[in-house]
Amino acid sequence: MELNEDLNKSYFIVVKRNKKGLSKGCIGRVDAETPDGYLTGVVYRGSGSLKSNARVKKWDTHPLSRHQAQLLLFVSPANRRLDLLCHLQLFKAICQLAYDDLVVVKHKRDFQPCLVKKLMQIGKSDKAGDLNMLGFELELMDTEQDILTKKTVSLPLFSAADIVQVVPSHLNNRQPLRLNTAVDLNRKAVTHINSMPALTMKKESILHEQDMSNAIQTSIPPSEFSMGVGSMVEVISDSSTTVYGVIRWIGVPEGKKDCWAGLELDNEFISGSDGMFGSKRYFTCKENTALFVPLTQCKPDSRLQFSLASKEIPEPPETPSVLEDSDEVPHVPPVSEPEVLSRLVGRMRGIQGHFNSCYLDATLFSLFTSSITFDRVFNSTADSEEGISHCLRRDIVNPLRRSGFVPAESVMNFRKQLGCKSFATEEKDPEEFISILLKDVLHIDPLLKFRSCAGLSQDAFTHQIIVDKSQAGVVPSVQQLLEISLVSSDLKFEEIPSCLIVQMPRFGKNYKMFSKIVPSTELDITDLLHCSPRECFLCGCLADYECAQCLTDHKLQPGRIKQYCSTCNTQVHIHPSRHKHTPHKLTVPDNLPADAPVQRTTLELFAVLSINTSHFVSFVKYGPDPRSWIFFDSMADRYGDDNNGYNIPVIRACPEVADFLSQSEEELATTDLNHCTELVQRLLEDSYMCLYQSTDVLPESSTSTDVSITAV
């Protein structure tokens, strides 16, 4: 239920210790917001104590509706308010309670079932706009028979924090809950959201009421009480895998004694049905998507924190700001491989897209989810508390790694802080954003340092592959394209890059030079390093020369770098078709034996950004297992219309990507994509940028003196 309130008023709760004397858990009313991100207004300290003209950082608060603020104001001590607010699903159910709803409260060191009777306003409101506390008048049900006859015992006034469970029911015949003052003044109606129906004495409802009373007597855990028909849940199957679905039916099926739930699953299940259980049909759905399990085995869907059963469009999931005891934001490590599937995969996971943000969402997700390199970069950069990197860590990176979800509001706030209006309203190219992110936000030196044969140096954050289409095959790999691009441009890496971000040869969002490009899972850059030992292309001895003109020679394996020892260089260029070539002398370490083994230097692929019809998505490798791949789309689905809805980000496991890339380049080039999955097709056809990392090299921070690059 939501009270009729002045929509121009907004409220907040302080979630971080404030230097102005405001403790965590204080409730306040926003009167104004300053351009530098501060909220000013009245703070209610409890017991009628007010602090006028209070000033608090917006990012140290969590927004509340008036009704939420009134319910929390009655909770004491203040830290209990934050505990309740962290249980969002329970708190939202409490805010929507109606007359005769069944709840469970902790009373006299025990958990007791109660019926909701009144919503009480504590104290008389003397001035318009005053914030009065709200509490619940409940009536106790002592026995199982009391639940059926509604025999109740009066209890003292309860706060929202005293309610530990809200019991679901699919029979909704509730009366509107009335708002009362403690002295029964200012009685007025309250608006409700139909979410949790009350128990009634209709004949058709008695069986369900008995089931529900049995559930209370057998102490079903709190999570079950917050679920009803229409709730999205997850269940551990017999094969120990987690399946997800929507509750379509609750009751006692034939042949059973306990309360069961009938689920319609997101995906087909090998032992599923179409809504039949035994010989009886309880609901209808697609074949192999219905599953019946005891209600006690269901848990709220960890991927999605709202119910799709509500007729009103619910608000997106909200997570209160991290409750820290100090101003320093802690470092949350990347999501480890064993935790990714449970923490990240599902709907409403990842970074929520909004207003042309997909280029930024996909890039941030690729860089900060599991990359070891960028974790080192991020942990080594120095910035003030008020800096933009502080905001990036607090509002995006830490929530993504800790809870697996970043709301669109946090991303929009970060976009605004980038300092350019177009970043908050327009779609950009990832390479433009990456340059600003690394240079202006993280303050690190360019990741790539190149040197030409003439000794000229140049730096860059990303490398755009520029090749002639005739220089590569029909389906080239990133390895081939990178070698051709650097050799043709007379460039070599001056040092091993900690991270190599490679842009594919496509121009704009529509034109791409190759219909398919194979992302090399491992990039060998040994032959692309300046002043590094290299093997002769033919005999394997120490190479002394390199020939750019031999790169496209079809008789010498085109598309591969050609370097030769002195003997092979002479023999190869005796041929009439090559006598006009001009190989150049390589710079190699002094006193190195001709037969010395060459240590290969490789980088590993950890993410791929893809684009199709101006929309960016990403593939991320989240661990050492070759099949540890996930797919992320910040706008995979939408809830509601363009004006009142919001985007639903989705993360999917895609081990088939690894299975496909494990093939040889020859097999990949001849594979018919019509027989591949959708995600494999998107990976090969729509690759925009491939991200590689070296786990042995740490980038140098321009603001940190104890971080250095280690050359291999």
Image (tube, rainbow, N blue to C red):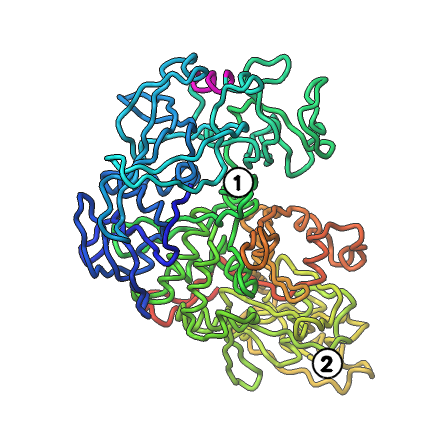
* Residue located at (54% from left, 50% from top): 622
The residue under label 2 is which amino acid type?
Gln
Return the residue at label 2: 549
Q: Dot 2 lies on which element?
A: helix
The residue under label 1 is which amino acid type?
Ser
Q: Is residue 458 above or below residue 435?
A: below
- Badge 2 density bin: few <14, some 14–19, many ≥20, Cα 10 Å: some
**Residue 91 appearing in the image:** yes
Q: Dot 1 lies on which element?
A: loop
Q: Is residue 390 left or right of residue 500?
A: left
Q: Is residue 534 above or below residue 326?
A: below
Per the rendered image, the range of residues in magenta is: 210-218
Residue 327: percent from left, percent from top: 26, 56
Q: Nearer the viewer, mark 1 or mark 2?
A: 1
- Badge 1 density bin: few <14, some 14–19, many ≥20, Cα 10 Å: many
Mark 1 and 2 residues: CB-CB less than 8 Å, in contact? no
